[in-house]
Image: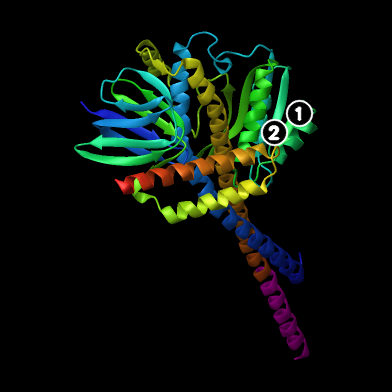
Amino acid sequence: MPSTRDIRRRIKSVKNTAQITKAMQLVAAAKMKKAQDQAANGRSYAELLNKILVSLKESAEEGVHPYFSAGKGDRTLVVVIATDKGLCGALNTNLLKKVIQSKLGDEVDFVTIGRKATQALSRLRRNLLADFPIRDPARFAEVRAVGRFLQEKYLTGDYQKVLIAFNNFINTVSQVPTVEQLLPVNPVTLGGKRNFDEKAREVVASELPQYTFEPAAAAVFETVLPQYVNGTLYQMVLEARASEHSSRMVAMKNATDNAKQILKDLTLEYNKVRQAAITNELLEITTAKMALE
Amino acid sequence: MPLNLEIVTPEASIFRGSVDSVELPGVQGEIGVLPMHAPLITTMNYGELRLHNAGSTTNLVVGEGLVEITGAYARILTDMAVDVESIDEAAIEQALERAKQTLDGLKPGEQQEEVAAVMASIQRCTAQLHIRRKRRAV
């Protein structure tokens, strides 16, 4: 039987923990709102651009732009977008599990965004090419640096494709680890809903109008495709950030609720122990009195 | 038959609806788009975009972007789209001044990404000021 003092001490420490997790929950909730809005606002732009380019890819001539056809190399470049900080539930674990489970073969090089990804991949002794720290909230200029690095790597001809692994934001309680192909241009899912179901695509492909390009197809692609890479990557970072803050908010809310439950149980036990001690004392007094009479 | 127009920027969807026609600043000069325009893909420069609908005209300042036109649809993806009426000249001038100062603070040859971002913001501000003043003069 623990003494009342032990229980009091535990109650105090649990209370402290609850206070901290509650504060973290509030901070995450404020950041979450901003990150979710940012991700939602950019989504339609990225989706529309992706849709247009995918339909153009199908009608484009062979070799009009290197981003439309698979690279010459046989290696795969994978960008893993994880978080910098922990305490966000199983977010990073799930993402890495997804990366490892998707059969990428041996010829894989990694680029990471976020410290957790860097740590995990170097622990697994994977081939790390670069890691980019991106602040919170993410700024487009920082992401553009990553985009330029990827494009340079892709154009050197060592790589067949560039994949991005990130957590897709669906809603506050659900985030889906996703691996999408950034290069060559391919349909990507952003924020949960699949904007390309196969049937709709077939119809589009058969009725695809013969576009005129102004000034010329190559020139148009030359300006649009680098923007596409950077823009899509930025949107993916935004999705990942929205997922991170949501997941952290939920994790901290669970922690706070748990602490409150423990607090309740401990208080009950404390009262029981205290009452038992009082009853005991009373018994002793009465017995002593009775013995004296 | 109206033209279904969609204008989207990375920050928001600016316009979605049907219009009678639209004039936009293509890289090779102004393009007027009426319904049933031939399928066209082109890029856009900084400039003024005019929406004509039921006799009224809306003027927007737009940035660089991609334009996709099929018979009944026109989709415009751009990095900026602002209604000329809503431009606050004083605020833009301040932003322009700040951007120029930032640019002076950056060393040439370094921080290319920063330079590119500042240059883009200068271009956006100049385009807004230019078109706003032109509109006012008319």
**Residue shown at 34% from the left, 12% from the top:** A207
**Residue shown at 23% from the left, 28% from the top:** B2
Disc 2 to disc 1, C-alpha distance: 8 Å
Secondary structure mostly taken by the magenta-highlighted segment of the chain: helix
Q: Which mark is residue A128?
A: 1
Q: Is residue A193 visible?
A: no
Label 2: element kind: strand
- Position of residue A10 relative to residue B115, above or below, is below
**Residue shown at 59% from the left, 56% from the top:** A27
Residue A160, position in %: x, y? 65, 15
Q: Which mark is residue A72?
A: none
- In the image, what residue type sits under mark 2? Thr
Q: Quadrant of residue A205?
A: top left
* Image quarter hosting the C terminus of chain A: bottom right
Tell me which label, 2 or 1, sits earlier in the chain.
2
- Position of residue A278 relative to residue A52, above or below, is below
- In the image, what residue type sits under mark 1? Leu
Q: Is residue B11 visible?
A: yes
Residue found at the far front of this picture = B137
Q: State the residue in front, A277 or B129.
A: B129
Instruction: Let me know if residue A275 is in the magenta part.
Output: yes
Residue A147, position in %: x, y? 62, 30
Q: Disc 2 sits on a residue from what chain?
A: A
Q: Are marks 2 and 1 in contact (CB under 8 Å)?
A: yes
Instruction: Let me know if residue A286 is in the magenta part.
Output: yes
Q: What span is in magenta?
A: A272-293
